[in-house]
Amino acid sequence: MRKISARQIVIAASALLGASAAHAETKIGAIFDLTGSLNIYGIQQTNALQLAVDSINASGGLLGEPVSVVTYDAQSQDSKYTQYANTAILRDKIDALFAGLTSSAREAVRPVIRKANIPYFYPALYEGGACDKQTFATGPSASQQLSVLVDWAVKKYGKKIFIMAPDYNFGTISAHWVHEYAKQHGAEVVGEDILALTVTDYAPTIQKIQAAKPDFVVALPVGANQTGFLEQFAAAGLKDSIGLVSTNYGSGNQQVVVSPAAGKGLIANQGYFEVVDNPTNAEFVKMWHAKYGAKEPIISEAVDTWNAVHLWAEAVKKAQSADADKVIAALESNLTFDAPNGTVKLEPGSHHLRQNIYIAEGDDKHSFNILETINDVAPVFENEKCDLVANPDLVEHFTPETN
């Protein structure tokens, strides 16, 4: 028998370890709100992530191995996002994280991810301005949506605007953007009401609107309580004389729960509606219905999540590695993806997407009709403020006041 030296054993063991490392499992983390008040969003985000991973694995996976998912339920609590982000990194050794709906959830995750230096994807529409090396936003920013919506509404209804918004980052910063775009289009904000999420009686707000006599209201209701504003606005008979527009109506399938009287004629604009008509979306909807059924319409955050997973996968393929620095470099290489909402492009500097923005009108059947498609809308504000290629150490949350 041939004698094997200790040195040969060490070399062979090292080779085996190297081969094992080369084919190590690629693992991602998903932290979404599967229970609690935000679960309408979190369940669909999780479903979209799993559908994306299934499609990747059906095509051979990544780096010769299937992608695995570790899923956590944040229970609609920000503290859980911090807790599970740490768990995903330290215990489960994930290669990338997909997490969050609200801005507060995103901000709970960002410092943890930044310290660990792994790619983090935030798949939801939001107020905009988040800027750091590890964070990638795949939903549209407020400036992308409101630049389009205010322009459209001023032409449609007139130049007097009233704002109804929730009292936290999304609402207050979006309200700033309405003021900004009103000035750009020669319009004026004649009144606004920034309201706690707990408010259920909108009679005082209705009275303010009646006194201000706007041509249209920009309404940004969040959660079940604030959806009640839409019903009370319609019940007060204001829909006949005042337009009602929103950047987030329908993002949580609010059109399903409001009455036909309240929903018909309401204008929404987002990066995705299930009724978007293109071959890629038709195939996506078919896949979704086959796996999850057609109980409720697919929300925009589901597509934001689908796009995020596929962009990450494209970056891993390009880098030929799941190593964070290599993947982030690949994500900053002008990646594009043929998405259900149209072709999207990841901007290297700002880590936000160029994407289509759709203006849709609610019908009396709890759905929407697309009125207009604005193609390839750039995240102009984020691109101006945030160049992470030139300034990789930049960590900031820019707002319109810093514009």
Image: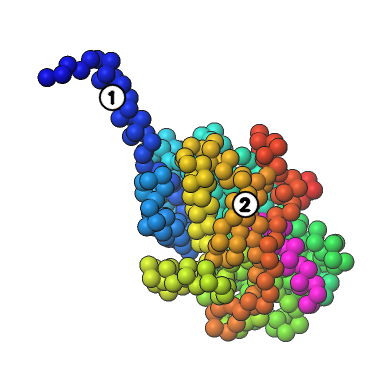
Q: Residue furthest front?
A: 2
Q: Residues within 10 Å of mark 2 (few under 14, many from 20)?
A: many
Magenta stretch prevailing secondary structure: helix
- Earlier residue among tags 1 and 2: 1
Q: Secondary structure beneath disc 1?
A: helix
In the rendered image, which quarter contains the N terminus?
top left
Query: Which range is magenta?
Result: 139-157
In this figure, which residue is indicated by the disc labeled 2?
346
Give the image location of residue 30, x and y in percent. 45, 50
In this rendering, the answer to whether 155 lies above or below 130 is below
For the question of whether residue 250 can be seen, the reply is yes
| Residue sitting at x 38%, y 36% | 22
Q: Which mark is residue 395?
A: none
- Asked where in the image residue 276 lies, by quadrant, the reply is bottom right
| Residue sitting at x 41%, y 59% | 55
Disc 1 to disc 2, C-alpha distance: 43 Å
Q: Residue furthest right?
A: 186
> Any magenta on residue 148?
yes
Q: Nearer the viewer, residue 276 or 202?
A: 276
Mark 1 touching mark 2, by CB under 8 A?
no
| Residue sitting at x 47%, y 41% | 320
For the question of whether residue 102 can be seen, the reply is no
- Asked where in the image residue 156 lies, by quadrant, the reply is bottom right
Q: Nearer the viewer, residue 317 or 346?
A: 317
Q: Residue furthest left?
A: 1
